[in-house]
Amino acid sequence: MMILKKIQLTNFRCFKQISVDLHPHLNVFVGENGQGKTAILDGIAVGLGAVLTHLPNVKGISFRSNDRWQELPTISGGTILTPTQTTALNQAPYVRVRLESTDGITWDRTEKRDRSKQTQQQIPPDKKLNELHHFLEHIINDIQAGLPTNLPVMVHYGTDRAGRSSLSASQQSYFNKTFNRFKALEEAMKPNSRVDFMLEGFAFQEDIERREKEDRGDFEYRQPLLESVRQAIYQIIPYCTDIRTTISPLRLRVTLEPIKSQPNLLFLDQLSDGYRAMLALVTDLAFRMAHANPHLENPLQAEAIVLIDEVDLHLHPQWQQTVLPDLLQTFEKTQFIVTTHSPQVLTTVEEPECIHGLVWEKGLVHMKQPNSCYGAESSRLLKDILGVEPRPQQTKMALMLKKYFQLIEQDKGQEQGALDIRAQLEKWSRGDEMKLVKADMEIRRRKVFGA
């Protein structure tokens, strides 16, 4: 069972040490920019890269040169040098990612700073990859023997997942390719656009479907693998009623039928950023799952681990309120690990244990979980979880409202200074500000009952 239970990052980017217990179905990381949300996804991707590397003819990913944690050096007396005093940085002796699955398989990947004896002495014992490789060997052997064994799917989607939608002629070689099951994980841990892989696979399956229609004499025939991909798209992408590829150049074309509007035939590169990003993600994920486990009646129900950075990317708030429920319903056995800045996304998370808030204090990070979030008003989650006031506090309107209420609390709410402020607030809000209604109620209360 390839579902993650726990992750540990040591000396990885901004984290000297962090350990997170994961929910088996959904994990949502939140925090300000630069707090480490993307770093966590990238760290998990490095750990999962060991899975891909062990599969036949599949390349995984490993550490990059800038993944190792670093700090400014100190001099005698413990004084920390500033960036203006030195350009040298102290790098940690090693960087490590450790993952643990729900069935007890633990593995880690470690990269040393150098091969010196001093560095080696600073590195604690590791688990290595033995348990993982033993687990994978059974799957590999069964698949190569033609047995109906499930192949776990794992994919990483970064913020540049929309990508381009056409291929050059030299890349249109899908008719000559062999799409074995392991190919479903090709480049799966690279977070940026992989539209060409998805397009090639889609066109390949459409060609199979066309041939089957001719052989069967049944032009209503639907190729099961391709149909499962289509259904995933129709369930998640609003107004999408048809999707297919066109040749020369190879492109993805969709039909959108908005309510009270004429259907539109559009290519992937003609769609808005939100539509393009979601369509590319859902199509790529559904195709990989269907291709990895074609023996299943519904391959979308296979186990998978999916990393999505900024799951709300380019989406209208209304779509943000449905993106996670739709993904979870369509891919029921998938473990989603995502990041977001959107309270609209957070209000759809049923279990508060699924939310991991990154909070830094004195150079150390800890996780903060809300007491509740499901179905809550987004304004409350904006403040309670994301730490942001629903009203921008530095606008003239907000500052003047604050001053107005201070005058009311001093029983000066009907003096000329307060009345002038009130007039300006009325002008700005055009009579549509609930805070002013509350202000009137507070003034009347003070008249009757006093302070």
Image (cartoon, helix red, strand yellow):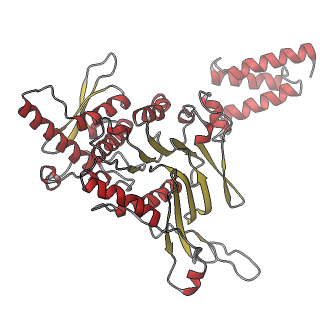
Q: Position of residue 304 (x, y in %)?
A: 41, 46
Based on the displayed image, in which of its 4 quarters is residue 145 positioned?
bottom left
Q: Position of residue 126 (x, y in %)?
A: 54, 70
Instruction: State the residue in front, 181 or 258.
Output: 181
Based on the displayed image, in which of its 4 quarters is residue 386 positioned?
top right
Instruction: State the residue in front, 419 or 24.
Output: 24
How many numbered callouts?
0
Please give left or right for residue 64 compared with residue 28 in the image.
left
Residue at 32%, 33% in the rendered image: 233
Picture quarter with the C terminus: top right
Please give left or right for residue 45 compared with residue 365 in the image.
left
Residue at 61%, 59% in the rendered image: 18
Residue at 58%, 41% in the rendered image: 354
**Does residue 118 sit above or below 417 in this rendering?**
below
Residue at 74%, 83% in the rendered image: 76
Q: Position of residue 345 (x, y in %)?
A: 53, 35
**Does residue 189 sit above or below 354 in this rendering?**
below
Based on the displayed image, in which of its 4 quarters is residue 286 positioned?
top left
Q: Position of residue 138 (x, y in %)?
A: 36, 58
Please give left or right for residue 138 compared with residue 409 in the image.
left
User: Outermost residue, bottom direction?
Assistant: 117
User: Outermost residue, right direction?
Assistant: 450
